[in-house]
Amino acid sequence: MVSPERKFFCVTASSLAQEVHAKEPPQSTKFLPKDVVLYQYEACPFCNKVKAFLDYYDIPYKVVEVNPISKKEIKWSDYKKVPILKVDGEQMVDSSDIIDKLFQRIHPENPIPDDDEDKKWRGWVDNHLVHVLSPNIYRTTSEALESFDYITTHGNFSFTERIIAKYAGAAAMYFVSKKLKKRHNITDERAALYEAAETWVDALEGREFLGGGKPALADLAVFGVLRPIRYLRSGRDMVEHTRIGEWYTRTESTVGESSRIKA
Ligand SMILES: N[C@@H](CCC(=O)N[C@@H](CS)C(=O)NCC(=O)O)C(=O)O
């Protein structure tokens, strides 16, 4: 949640961090797109994963917030999910594929190896971590309401949709999240979230980032998907009850301020 507290934190922490953790050089000379547009939902973990990458690499981008009910902003596309990234008119879909493509354009000399540690943990984010999030943010009726308050205030909803979505959405997702729990074999959702956070810290093996002194793509992926829940009850609990906080803060400050172009 973008609370004033967080905004304040981001500004101070990111300016401090620049001295400690250098970011990638702003933009590669080989990849200088003129027009990058991200079609997204503000609270979507996959969209936040792409944003963490764009922010870290200082690639300026515009955001089109998609209305999740009508989806009229992406009617032009055959792909019916978000994120969709348009790079100088070229459509890219699926967060991990988008990141692979952009990475390859930034580092054409460095193909992404097939079986390395980074790839393994990026897979863990897509196949495990994201599935732990929904049962947590809709765990109780009050958490479901808190989440929908965040989603509806930051998303693209009409006035009526906002009111209806907040209450109907929260109620529906409370029940859907119980089904998701079963589907992904989760019995205690908070325990699963804490375990995932601890698993990630163990994977770091004492390094600042999985990438060593600078974030690997997996660091950006874990950070990106956790960002929308960080200031919700579940994210606050996770930071309080696990060792992930230090890494999260370090990554948040290293990713730095958003390179989003405000319309
Ligand atoms: N594998 C895709 C998953 C994308 C995805 O499931 N996006 C959700 C939003 S979080 C979506 O658009 N769902 C369809 C809908 O809202 O109707 C990715 O990594 O980008």
Image: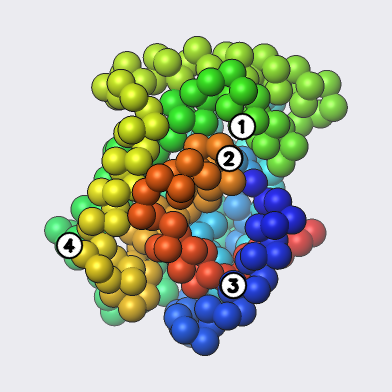
Drawn side of residue 11 relative to residue 83, left or right: right
Residue at 76% x, 61% y is 262
Give the labeled residue for mark 4. Answer: 116
Among numbered discs 4 and 3, the one appearing first in the sequence: 3
Residue 60 image point, x, y percent: 62, 68
Give the SS element for disc 3: helix
**Dot 1 and dot 3 residues touching (CB under 8 Å):** no
Residue at 44% x, 35% y is 133
* Three-letter residue code for mark 4: Asp
The label on residue 147 is 1
Among numbered discs 2 and 3, the one appearing first in the sequence: 3
Among numbered discs 1 and 3, the one appearing first in the sequence: 3
> Foreground: 227 or 13?
13
User: In which quarter of the view is residue 88 placed?
Assistant: bottom right
**Disc 2 vs disc 1: which is toward the camera?**
2
Q: Is residue 75 visible?
A: no
Give the labeled residue for mark 2. Answer: 232
* Three-letter residue code for mark 2: Leu
Drawn side of residue 205 relative to residue 35, left or right: left
Residue 212 image point, x, y percent: 28, 74
**Disc 4 vs disc 2: which is toward the camera?**
2
**Dot 4 and dot 2 residues touching (CB under 8 Å):** no
Among numbered discs 4 and 2, the one appearing first in the sequence: 4
**Disc 4 vs disc 3: which is toward the camera?**
3
Give the SS element for disc 2: loop
